[in-house]
């Protein structure tokens, strides 16, 4: 893995440390490893251990001038009964009341947006999406910015299953 890619995987861990006192109550993260294009970590939030896996797109398409960091996450917060929760940090503010379209293989998922993030509405959809990610090889994510800029991000799912297994094991999640 390249030095740039390794640094990219460490950004979410460092972000947890920086954001700790202000928003999440997180104290520190422990990198579980990098698996293909995916990273896995544990984190502490409100004194409890959670786990997260993440990746960055291998390709970003859109006619935008500036865009922040873009990530997909799958997070476990077992103490809150929130596991396999899929979210996207898209690097811009979404168009109000817009949706995000995610395609994995032959499956299509529609997520709701809020600010710079997108989520599934139901836990069962998170589980279905994770199952598709474990079986797939790539994922596309289509969204619209508050300035009506259409973006299409393509993620590699290489290493997803291994990263997901590591997070499942660390957080004792099935």
Image: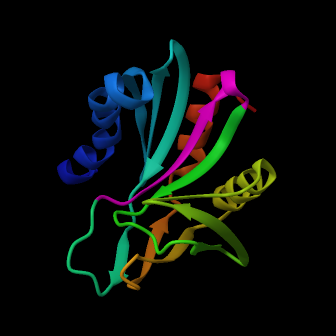
Q: Quadrant of residue 32?
A: top left
At which x and y percent is residue 111?
Answer: 64, 65
At which x and y percent is residue 71?
Answer: 41, 56
Whether 122 is among the magenta residues is: no
The residue under the point 36% across, 60% down is 70
Span highlighted in magenta in the image: 69-81
Residue 102 position (above or below residue 6): below
Residue 89 position (above or below residue 136): above
Quarter in which the C terminus is drawn:
top right
- Furthest toward the top, the residue is 47
Whether 74 is among the magenta residues is: yes
* Along the line of sight, the residue nearer the viewer: 152 or 154: 152
The residue under the point 27% across, 62% down is 68
At which x and y percent is residue 27?
Answer: 37, 18
* Along the line of sight, the residue nearer the viewer: 118 or 105: 118
Q: Quadrant of residue 35?
A: top left
The residue under the point 69% across, 70% down is 109
Taking the image as shown, residue 16 lies to the left or right of residue 125, namely left
The residue under the point 43% across, 29% down is 24
């Amino acid at each position: 893995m390249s030095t740039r890619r390794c640094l990219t995987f460490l950004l979410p861990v460092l972000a947890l440390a920086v954001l700790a006192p202000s928003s999440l109550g997180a104290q520190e993260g422990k990198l579980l490893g990098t698996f293909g294009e995916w990273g896995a970590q544990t984190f502490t939030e409100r004194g409890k251990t959670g786990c997260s896996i993440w990746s960055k797109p291998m390709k970003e398409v859109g006619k935008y001038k500036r865009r922040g960091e873009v990530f997909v996450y799958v997070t476990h917060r077992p103490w809150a009964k929130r596991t396999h929760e899929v979210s996207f940090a898209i690097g811009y503010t979404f168009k109000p009341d817009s949706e995000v379209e995610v395609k994995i293989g032959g499956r299509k998922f529609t997520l709701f947006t809020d600010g710079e993030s997108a989520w599934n509405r139901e836990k069962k959809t998170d589980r279905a999406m994770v199952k598709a990610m474990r079986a797939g090889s790539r994922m596309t994510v289509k969204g619209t910015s508050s300035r009506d800029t259409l973006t299409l991000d393509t993620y590699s799912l290489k290493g997803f299953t291994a990263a997901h297994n590591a997070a499942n094991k660390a957080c004792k999640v099935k």
